[in-house]
Amino acid sequence: MKKATRFVGLDVHAETIAVAVAEGGRSGAVESLGSIPNRPDCVRRLVKRLGAVSTWRACYEAGPTGYALYWQLAELGVHCEVVAPTLVPVRAGDRVKTDRRDAEKLARLYRSGDLTMVWVPDKPQEALRDLVRAREAAKKDQLRARQRLGKFLLRHGRRPPTPITAWTGKHLDWVRTLSFDEPAQEAVFVDYLAEVDHARTRIERLEQHIDDAVAGMPAQMKAVVDALQALRGVAQTTAVTIVAEVGCLSRFPRPKQLMGYSGAVPSENSSGARTQRGGITKTGNSHLRRVLTEAAWAYQYRPNLSAALRKRQQALPDEINELAWKAQHRLHKRYQRLLLRGKPRQHVVTAVGRELLGFIWAIGVTAERQQQADGQHARRRAA
């Protein structure tokens, strides 16, 4: 008789991992095995202690410790899954929270099938995600550095003699001509200006790394990045961010599921005959939602093929370019229609960004299928 599978719940922290085991069957006991240090050698000893890896499976909540434990357990042959922490059921009235109880709850809910799992990227995908997020952080730091310097100059009445667009080359040339009589203010000015220059060189360095990462991508991933750039408002950095944050687009059977993953869908509180919808849920990938909003602003303008967009579409299949052209017409009309109905501009852009995700899904799935078909055709020819 085949032995029932055991379910292991891991409450993972930076230094410790609380372990609990739920025996197979809904009535099986749930036992705490205590805590172990969060170190690779300790994890290996735990795996040996739990017996043959075919007789048990493990789960833990996604969190600041990332996926290092998942990858280690996978290398050891353990079936491990990562849980969405915000979707773990919580019993009303339960006011006691400890690492032991959390591990036992995970093991019990894992056994009953009441947990929602998250998609776990592989190591190259996670590396690409770290890179695009580093650039995003650098852009935020650049914005803060520019604001500090700009407000410092404004407080001291330093304005350019003629109107200049802020932070262009001409504007920075003018800023570098400034000086202050007071040594303390001169020190502050030099420091603020150095931070602005440092942020610029940092972004340039990261963008060069992104270019190198795109050049070395697997064929299927690169095909999706190239295909997404057929869309207006989606250049290389945005396309790479989408691929890094979402992974394989065809893992979503329908575009609505991708929209839910982004957290750009309206919240709802309806009961009986009452229907009430509110703002977007924001319970999704915030990095994906940010680039979508930035891209959606491009659709306030009437459909057009700029020289840069035409160059990006040059080597792409007609099917993908037709989808991108359809997106321009449809999203521009939606933008104008919602604006005429009196909707705030930010709400309009959010709605357009959500619909843009549908075209991103369609183009990404088309590119993935085309790449798979090309790969099968090449294998058949080689055979």
Image (cartoon, grey):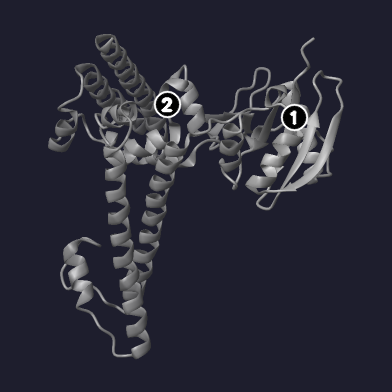
Q: Is residue 345 visible in the rendered structure shown here?
A: no
Q: Which residue is mark 2?
A: 248
Distance CA(mark 2)–CA(mark 1) = 34 Å
Callout 2–callout 1 Cβ contact below 8 Å: no
Question: Which numbered marker is on residue 22?
Answer: none
Residue 111 at x, y percent in the picture: 75, 23
Q: Which residue is mark 1?
A: 51
Q: Secondary structure at mark 1?
A: loop
Q: Residue at x 69, y 46 (%)?
A: 42
Q: Residue at x 31, y 72 (%)?
A: 194
Q: Residue furthest bottom?
A: 182
Q: Relative to residue 333, is residue 378 depicted above or below? A: above
Q: Is residue 370 visible in the rendered structure shown here?
A: yes
Q: Residue furthest left?
A: 307
Q: Quadrant of the C terminus?
A: top left
Residue 329 vs residue 260, the one in the foreground: 260
Q: Secondary structure at mark 2?
A: loop
Residue 221 vs residue 275, the one in the foreground: 221
Residue 69 at x, y percent in the picture: 61, 40
Whichever of labels 2 and 1 marks the residue nearer the N terminus, that label is: 1
Q: Amino acid at mark 1?
A: Gly
Residue 291 at x, y percent in the picture: 38, 40
Q: Amino acid at mark 2?
A: Cys
Q: Nearer the viewer, mark 2 or mark 1?
A: 1
